[in-house]
Image (spheres, helix red, strand yellow):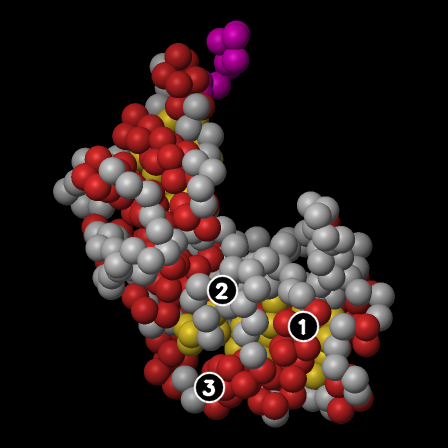
């Protein structure tokens, strides 16, 4: 960028953790915008951190009373705060410092839509924060990840199995690219699914060796981690797989529910395809997403809101079975709400929609 470009640079879009790039934009005399890949609620929490630190002067503890955060309709339990805000290694200070820099930008680009997070979005109006542009849902519904492209044979088997199942009859369990469980927890999941009596497609990933930081891998033999005889007993109603093509599965007519880690992309995908969720958060801001989706938005059924991957907590089979049965047999209020928001998500991104208009406003301001 040392030479004058033939096409002028009208803005620099930075990740929320790259706030130092705001200074680069200042040096180049171009406006900067922060891209938020999570919810407007999460953005609101980040903007609340500096105010809270100035007023209270202490960091979060899980035992704190419920917090009043303007972007959330309900008080937020400290136990659902992102893990990094609860650790003792400076995570709170790091997030707070990033958030303080946001005031120097020209706006936030958020992967959400107004109809989904109306309360959170309206909480930014009239305040001192830069403008918020809700441009979502931004989904790669036609793409294929590198891992998926290397597993076409396995994915073919998954989709063929789904083709043979009745409409909206399958509970899909999938926990993201990093999600994995101990052997004891996998057994509880299996027993819970069997106890529920419902059809299921369950993605099970193998944790890396203890003490090693690596991505989960696929089991060579599921029998090493599942209860004795489980695969034989459930062969007519269930399928256990490794990595699953989540978007393609959610789009399939046979899928009627999604037990999810509540990553924000996964929530948006489930809404896009009109699939209600049971919450099982794992890491990052997923506990906050789960809380918001259940309590503020009414779009999910709670299994757990504060589970954290790597903890000693065990979600038992009875609780899993109850949650799956609630999702597949009851949950009519949640299903109706999900259907309405699903329709709104598709309208938001086309001409005349809220996100289409917000994106147009953003481009117009950048070019002005």
Horizontal side of 2 relative to 199 (left or right) equals: left
Q: Is residue 311 above or below residue 222?
A: above
What residue is drawn where x is 30% and y is 66%? Answer: 296
307 to the left or right of 141: left
Which is nearer the N-term, disc 1 or disc 3? 1
**Range of residues picked out in magenta:** 1-11
As drawn, the label of residue 307 is 2
Circle number at residue 184: 1
Q: Position of residue 169 (x, y in %)?
A: 58, 86
Classify 10 Å Cα crowding around label 2: few (below 14), some (14-19), many (20 and above).
many
Outermost residue to the top: 3
Residue drawn at 22 percent across, 35 percent down = 54
Q: Nearer the viewer, mark 1 or mark 3?
A: 1
- Return the residue found at the far right: 220
Name the quadrant containing residue 229.
Answer: bottom right
Q: CA distance from mark 3 to mark 2?
A: 19 Å
Is 68 magenta? The answer is: no
- Residue 30 drawn at (x, y percent): 37, 19
Q: CA distance from mark 1 to mark 2?
A: 15 Å
Place of residue 350 in the rendered image (x, y in percent of width and height, measured from the top left)? 40, 55
Going from N to C along the chain, the mark reached first, 3 or 2, is: 2
Q: Disc number at residue 326? A: 3
Mark 1: give few (<14), some (14-19) or many (20+) Cα within 10 Å.
Answer: some
How many marks do you count on the picture? Answer: 3
User: Quick one: SS at disc 2?
Assistant: loop
- The quarter of the displayed image where residue 114 is located: bottom left
């Amino acid at each position: 960028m040392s030479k004058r470009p033939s096409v002028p640079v009208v803005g620099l879009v930075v990740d929320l953790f790259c706030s130092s790039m705001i200074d680069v934009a200042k040096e180049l005399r171009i406006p900067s915008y922060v891209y938020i890949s999570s919810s407007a609620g999460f953005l609101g929490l980040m903007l609340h951190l500096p105010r809270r630190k100035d007023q209270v002067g202490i960091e979060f503890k899980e035992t704190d009373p419920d917090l009043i955060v303007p972007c959330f309709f309900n008080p937020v339990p400290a136990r659902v705060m992102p893990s990094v805000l609860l650790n003792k290694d400076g995570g709170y200070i790091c997030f707070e410092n990033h958030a303080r820099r946001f005031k120097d930008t020209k706006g936030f680009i958020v992967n959400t839509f107004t109809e989904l997070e109306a309360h959170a979005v309206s909480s930014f109006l009239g305040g001192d924060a830069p403008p918020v542009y809700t441009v979502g849902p931004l989904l790669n519904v036609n793409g294929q990840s590198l891992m998926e492209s290397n597993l076409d044979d396995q994915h073919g088997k998954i989709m063929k199995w789904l083709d043979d199942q009745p409409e909206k009859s399958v509970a899909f369990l999938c926990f993201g690219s990093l999600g994995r469980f101990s052997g004891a927890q996998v057994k509880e999941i299996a027993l819970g699914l069997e106890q529920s009596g419902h059809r299921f497609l369950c993605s099970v990933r193998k944790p890396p060796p203890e003490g090693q930081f690596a991505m989960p891998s696929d089991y060579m033999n599921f029998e090493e981690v599942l209860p004795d005889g489980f695969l034989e007993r459930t062969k007519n109603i269930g399928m256990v797989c490794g990595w699953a093509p989540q978007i393609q599965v959610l789009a399939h007519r046979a899928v009627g529910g999604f037990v999810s880690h509540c990553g924000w992309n996964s929530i948006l995908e489930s809404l896009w395809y009109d699939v209600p969720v049971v919450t099982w958060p794992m890491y990052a801001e997923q506990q906050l997403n789960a809380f918001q989706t259940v309590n503020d938005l009414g779009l999910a059924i709670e299994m757990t809101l504060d589970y954290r991957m790597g903890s000693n907590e065990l979600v038992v089979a009875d609780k899993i079975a109850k949650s799956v049965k609630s999702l597949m047999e009851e949950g009519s209020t949640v299903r109706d709400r999900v259907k309405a928001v699903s329709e709104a998500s598709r309208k938001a991104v086309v001409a005349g929609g809220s996100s289409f208009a917000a994106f147009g406003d953003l481009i117009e301001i950048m070019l002005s």
